[in-house]
Amino acid sequence: MGGISIWQLLIIAVIVVLLFGTKKLRNLGGDLGSAIKGFKNAIGDEKDSADKAEKNSDTLADNSSTTANKVSESKENQKENSQA
């Protein structure tokens, strides 16, 4: 009752082709495809940059803990040397 049948869609498609022409519709389709492709690339770049940022923060955390360990070891060595 409320749905659109295949015949109604076909009539609408014919009217659109007659109004705009196939060349203009082809260009519109190409532009739409390019826009979707650019959108997908932007989303992929966003995910890649987020992954890189996460890896960098993990690396920085590892480096800071290593540095903290080295500093505490050097302080212990200095205490031992001063006591001797």
Image (cartoon, rainbow, N blue to C red):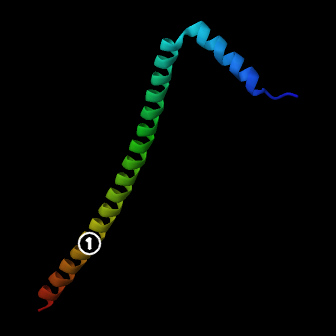
Q: Is residue 60 above or below residue 77?
A: above
> Looking at the rendering, which quadrant does residue 51 occupy?
bottom left
Which residue: 75% across, 23% down?
Answer: 7
Report the front residue among 33 and 45: 33
Report the front residue among 15 and 56: 15
Which residue: 48% across, 13% down?
Answer: 23
Which residue: 81% across, 29% down?
Answer: 3
> Looking at the rendering, which quadrant does residue 66 occupy?
bottom left
Q: Is residue 82 above or below residue 47?
A: below
Quadrant in the picture for the N terminus: top right
Quadrant in the picture for the C terminus: bottom left
Report the front residue among 15 and 70: 15
| Residue 36 rendering spot, x and y as whole percentages | 48, 32
**Which residue is label 1 attached to?**
66
Q: Is residue 21 left or right of residue 8?
A: left
Report the front residue among 19 and 38: 19
| Residue 54 rendering spot, x and y as whole percentages | 38, 56
